[in-house]
Amino acid sequence: MMRFVILGLAVSFGCNANDSNSKVTAEAPRQVVVNEPVDSLYIAKTLSFCDQVEHNLSSYKQLSKDIGGSTEGGEAKIFIDSKDTVKIEVTFYGETGKSIQEYYYEGKQFVLFKSKDVFYREPINTTSDVEIDSTAVERIVLKDMKVVHWVQDEQIKAENLYPEKTKEVLILHDELISLIRQ
């Protein structure tokens, strides 16, 4: 479909806190996963902040921009409270589906990533009525630019996967910022 969907990103809106964080550290020549406690209160506060942003969307200044990034194009909406960006919502379109990604910022820190990938039963060029075949949803909480909580299709993901997911989400974030600045 599109590069962003191939990466398998997708959004869950429920709140299931996980109490630990994984971090990869180098140890002569192999890597070891070290678990550090993650404050479940931080996760709850971050999710609450997200809900507050959603509740106040109409009060924020909104900028829109057409962006590429997929076969059928995309669009970004940037929500600004005073001088700070609090949310970027981007939709990438393709013939076989679309990807909706939401990036939340608190105090200039990237703290939450949500994604929902929608897959159509048939390519949009074969029918005027689009039927949804399936969706994939994901919610990722970040702290200090590291994944500390990851829910995919209502399942909490294993902590040993967090370091790789952190890299993936930060690459997506950087690509988005680059597309918006073009």
Image (cartoon, rainbow, N blue to C red):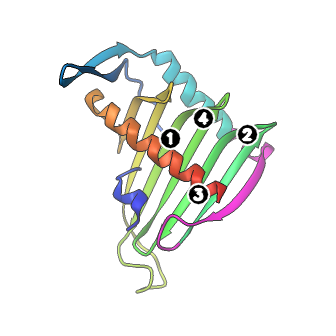
Judged by depth in the image, the label closer to the viewer, 2 or 3, is 3
Q: Is residue 95 magenta?
A: no
According to the picture, the residue beneath numbered tag 1 turns out to be: 113
Name the side, left or right, on which 50 lies relative to 134: right
Q: Disc 3 or disc 1, which is closer to the eye?
A: 3
Q: Is residue 181 above or below residue 133?
A: above
Q: Are marks 4 and 3 in contact (CB under 8 Å)?
A: no
Residue 25 falls in image quadrant: top left
Q: Tell me the distance, in whole angstroms, between the alpha carbons under discs 2 and 3.
A: 26 Å
Q: Earlier in the sequence, mark 3 or mark 1?
A: 1
Q: Secondary structure at mark 2?
A: loop
In space, the residues marked 2 and 1 are separated at their CA atoms by: 18 Å
Per the rendering, the mark at residue 4 is none
- Asked if the residues shown at circle 2 and circle 3 are in contact, with their CB atoms under 8 angstroms apart, the answer is no
Give the residue at mark 4.
50
Instruction: Report the residue at 45% width, 76% height from top.
Output: 130
Three-letter residue code for mark 2? Asn
- The residue under label 3 is 179
